Image: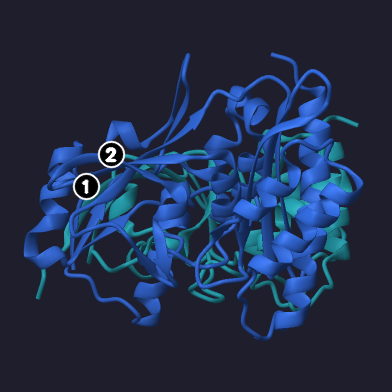
Amino acid sequence: MATKRHVTTIINGDPAEFLCATEQTLLDVLRDVLYLTGSKEGCASGDCGACSVILDGRLVCSCLVLGVEVEGRSVETIEGMASGDELHPLQRKFLEHAALQCGVCTPGFLVAAKALLDRHPDPTETQIRYWLAGNLCRCTGYDKIVRAVLDAAAQMRGN
Amino acid sequence: MDYRSPGTVKEAVELLTAHNGAGQVLAGGTDLLVKLRAGFVDPKLVVDVKSIPQLRGIAVDSGGFRIGAATSCAEIGEHAPLVAAWPGVVEALHLIGSTQIQGRATPGGNLCNASPAADSVPAMIAAGAICQVAGPAGEREVRVEDIVTAPGRTSLARGEFVVNFKLPKPRSRSGDAYLRLIPRTEMDIAVVGVGVALTLDENGVCTHARVGLGAVAPTPLLVAEGAKALIGTRVEGKALDALAAAASSACKPIDDKRGTVSYRVKVAGVLARRAALVALERARRQRI
């Protein structure tokens, strides 16, 4: 059996370390090694976005990153969005707008939307739809998700 | 599976040449990890090239641009001088996948994965990109259109990999553009992809042109007849008809769930015409 690799990284602002096999993806590590099960596996091929995380400031699919690749890097997951008991504005707006049903796609959408608003605080509806094209939802039909993101963006701008 | 992350080109070449070339290059991982998961590949060794400085970032000098082969599409799109000089190449790179894919995917991977439908390749071909390739015999330059030889296959020898893509500084009054057709709005594989780059003289007559075509043959194509259709013309009327005809003739497509042979042949001509018009507009607006 091959030796596991030791990886040191930062997850949601906190130093973290783990052992993983080289074949394990970051998603495998988050869920099975670190028990951060907020990120979901929807397709294992980078098509659905349910595994979305932010790696060194970039929105990525964690199923397409190897666990060993985050050595020395910084990862933000859905678990880091709320501040203690206080939900992120995006999370609150998703609830207000009923932008989720089964919730499987929701962590991915929230992380992706956060990555959008971090860079583009005032996106148009079209920009939101294109940015979120890599996140699939089988339940909601997307409309409420888009409205929630628009509303959260407005609130975060102080409108 | 062994995983190594060399810090130099030399180390990477040694790793890739060893073990009868059983190593696979890992850049963005957006193709390799999918294949790994699906069991299509089972490499003994994965060589992560992202720690090699020459493969990351964009260098600019008086001759033009050197795009590190393992630079992410997202990062490339943030390089304002490159976006201004080669908007067609950048927009082609930006059509790959989704925002998440853009955060990792690279031009080196898009080229060397050797899909006939790779989005960046027709635009790179039109731009006249030259690949700097490193290997056990040293470094050599290869025109981007000479890399892909068949679906999933490249002309790279064992131990070789692409270090960077060289794009010249564009001539004055030059423009490039990339258009593709997919069944959905986003997140799909090209049915046809066309890249056109052209240069005008001070009278608005085309003096240089290159046309790249993707997803309609076993490899991305350089369409020499398309360039001939444009050079010496004002890129209108009959010249555009000839370009469209040349693009359609160059197709050697297959029928599949995304498009039939006849549909692809027709759309190749339509997109070639439209891409030429976008490139023309950009050329008219550009003064160096």
- At label 1, which amino acid type do we have? Ser
- Quadrant location of residue B281? top right
Reading the image, the residue beneath label 2 is B51
Which element type, helix, strand or loop, lies under badge 2?
loop
Q: Say yes or no: labels 1 and 2 on the same chain.
A: yes
Q: Is residue B52 above or below residue B214?
A: above
Q: Mark 1 falls within which chain?
A: B
| B80 left or right of A31 in image | right
- At label 2, which amino acid type do we have? Ser
Q: Mark 2 falls within which chain?
A: B
Judge whether residue B190 can be spotted in this image. Answer: no
Label 1–label 2 contact, CB within 8 A: yes
Reading the image, the residue beneath label 1 is B5
At which x and y percent is residue B29? 40, 58
Tell me the residue at 69%/36% (across/down): B198
| A102 left or right of A127 in image | left
At which x and y percent is residue B96? 60, 56
The C terminus of chain B, quarter of image: top right
Tell me the residue at 63%/57% (across/down): B98
Which element type, helix, strand or loop, lies under badge 1?
loop
Could you classify mark 1 by the number of other residues whose Cα lies within 10 Å: few (under 14), some (14-19), or many (20 or more)? some
- Quadrant location of residue B206? top right
At which x and y percent is residue B259? 72, 80
Could you classify mark 2 by the number of other residues whose Cα lies within 10 Å: few (under 14), some (14-19), or many (20 or more)? some
At which x and y percent is residue B165? 43, 38
Which shade of the palette goes to chain B?
blue
Judge whether residue B95 can be spotted in this image. Answer: yes
| A48 left or right of B154 in image | right
